């Protein structure tokens, strides 16, 4: 099961990067196929529905956020975190936000009977119960932050950067949960040896595609005299690969490095004697 909505585009791009491209008749189709023998069928549904359907065995695996696993209280097996979200690779946060003009600085400052708007009522209820604060919680069906100051006193909302909350004149005063996207499985399915092997294969492909993002492969040649000067500034995941050139006094080097900064690195390598420098894209890195 793949998530529909805010995570949909990023998830479909990840699956394509992992050579698991989804095929469907239109963007409105809730079902599709992936040309891989380990995947029988694919459904695209709201992320808040996915933990329950996976828990109950309607599907073996799914992708959703830790926030929805916690909200639904679903018993699922986590195959791994997938470090991506709607706009960045950062986790999302479930936060408590209030108007800027209030002098509240934490949840402990809120008065009894405070009115809270949220799309995550169970997480919110547990948070305020633990704090011993009597809060009136109202389920929101969208535009949660827009209700603050007019209908409710505060909101519990999901944010990736905090920009939407700031635009609405709100400040974050507490954090309830840090949530990453997770690859989850039905516990019984995960305990099946054949299914688990397929799940582990898919996890390898997805995490490998994420690991490769923002990285490139550099290949270059260098003479023996300039080798140490080049290696001195050459970044790598562990250590560069260095091989002797056939019939020549020199070496061929390969290394993986961040895409960011490579525009400065390549001229610096050339200045230290490197030649034949190639920059190549990477689609997967499997540790």
Image: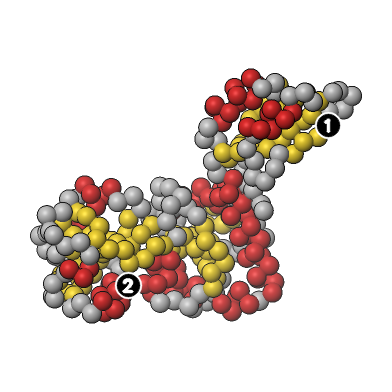
Q: Residues within 10 Å of mark 2 (few under 14, many from 20)?
A: many
User: Which disc, if any, is residue 244?
Assistant: 1
Looking at this view, is 135 or 43 the one in front?
A: 135
Secondary structure at numbered mark 1: strand
Q: Residue 124's x, y, as percent? A: 28, 72
User: Which disc, if any, is residue 144?
Assistant: none
Secondary structure at numbered mark 2: helix
Q: Residues within 10 Å of mark 1 (few under 14, many from 20)?
A: some
Which quadrant of the structure image shows residue 233? top right
Horizontally, residue 42 falls left or right of residue 191, namely: left
Q: Relative to 11, is 278 above or below?
A: above
Q: Relative to 115, is 98 above or below?
A: above
Horizontally, residue 254 falls left or right of residue 78, namely: right
Residue that appears at 48% across and 78% down: 75
Q: Could you tell me how far apart the alpha carbons at marks 1 and 2 are, in whole angstroms?
A: 59 Å
Residue that appears at 61% across and 74% down: 190
Q: Which residue is mark 2?
A: 123
Residue that appears at 54% across and 73% down: 77
Q: Nearer the viewer, mark 1 or mark 2?
A: 1
């Amino acid at each position: 099961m793949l998530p529909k909505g805010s995570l949909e585009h990023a998830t479909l791009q990840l699956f394509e990067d992992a050579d698991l491209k989804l095929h469907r008749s239109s963007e409105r189709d809730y079902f599709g196929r992936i040309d891989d023998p380990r995947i029988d069928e694919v459904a695209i549904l709201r992320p808040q529905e996915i933990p329950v359907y996976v828990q109950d065995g309607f599907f073996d695996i799914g992708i959703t956020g830790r926030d929805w696993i916690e909200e639904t209280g679903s018993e699922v097996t986590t195959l791994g975190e997938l470090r991506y979200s709607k706009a960045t690779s950062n986790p999302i946060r479930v936060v408590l936000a209030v108007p800027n003009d209030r002098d509240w600085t934490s949840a402990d400052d809120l008065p009894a009977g405070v009115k809270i708007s949220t799309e995550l009522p169970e997480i919110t209820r547990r948070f305020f119960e633990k704090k011993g604060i009597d809060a009136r919680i109202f389920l929101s069906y969208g535009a949660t932050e827009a209700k603050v100051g007019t209908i409710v006193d505060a909101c519990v909302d999901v944010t990736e950067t905090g920009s939407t909350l700031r635009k609405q004149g709100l400040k974050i005063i507490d954090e309830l949960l840090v949530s990453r996207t997770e690859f989850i499985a039905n516990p019984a399915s995960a305990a099946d040896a054949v299914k688990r092997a397929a799940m582990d294969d898919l996890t390898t492909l997805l995490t490998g595609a994420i690991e490769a993002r923002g990285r490139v492969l550099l290949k270059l040649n260098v003479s023996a005299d300039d080798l140490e000067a080049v290696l001195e500034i050459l970044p790598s995941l562990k250590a560069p690969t260095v091989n002797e050139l056939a019939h020549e006094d020199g070496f061929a080097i390969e290394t993986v490095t961040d895409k960011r900064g490579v525009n400065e690195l390549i001229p610096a390598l050339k200045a230290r004697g490197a030649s034949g420098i190639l920059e190549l894209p990477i689609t997967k890195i499997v540790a």
